[in-house]
């Protein structure tokens, strides 16, 4: 649909500028929304991986803390 309009090749700045000149044309809004949704999805994927790594590191730190407490308890805090 948008390929027939010919606005997919425009940069974000050019797209906003064209929309400012023709505010009643919804094709520009549709393209801006499509780009925003794609960028949001990409950011969401990056945040998901960051969250996973933070969870892994938290579990590792908790495990190491448990080992240290168990070792100290077993040796009688000497």
Image: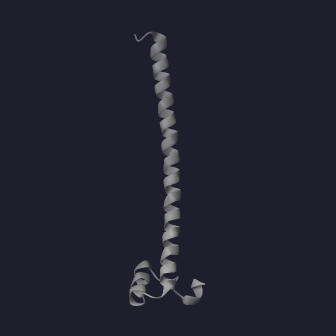
Q: Quadrant of residue 3?
A: bottom right
Asked if residue 17 is positioned above or below residue 50 in the image, the reply reads: below
Nearer-the-camera pick, 17 or 54: 17
The count of marks equals 0
Tell me what residue is drawn at x 46 percent, y 20 percent: 69
Q: Position of residue 15 (x, y in %)?
A: 44, 83
Tell me what residue is drawn at x 51 percent, y 69 percent: 37
> Quadrant of the image for the N terminus?
bottom right
Q: Residue furthest right?
A: 1
> Quadrant of the image for the C terminus?
top left
Nearer-the-camera pick, 26 or 39: 26
60 sits to left or right of 17: right
Tell me what residue is drawn at x 44 percent, y 16 percent: 72
Q: Position of residue 61 (x, y in %)?
A: 47, 33
Applied colour scheme: one colour
Q: Position of residue 48 (x, y in %)?
A: 52, 52
């Amino acid at each position: 649909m948008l390929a027939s309009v010919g606005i997919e090749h425009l940069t974000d700045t050019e797209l906003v500028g064209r929309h400012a000149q023709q505010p009643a044309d919804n094709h520009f809004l549709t393209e801006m929304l499509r780009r925003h949704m794609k960028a949001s999805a990409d950011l969401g994927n990056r945040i998901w991986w960051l969250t996973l790594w933070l969870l892994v590191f938290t579990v590792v730190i908790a495990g190491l803390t448990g080992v240290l407490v168990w070792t100290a308890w077993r040796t009688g805090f000497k």
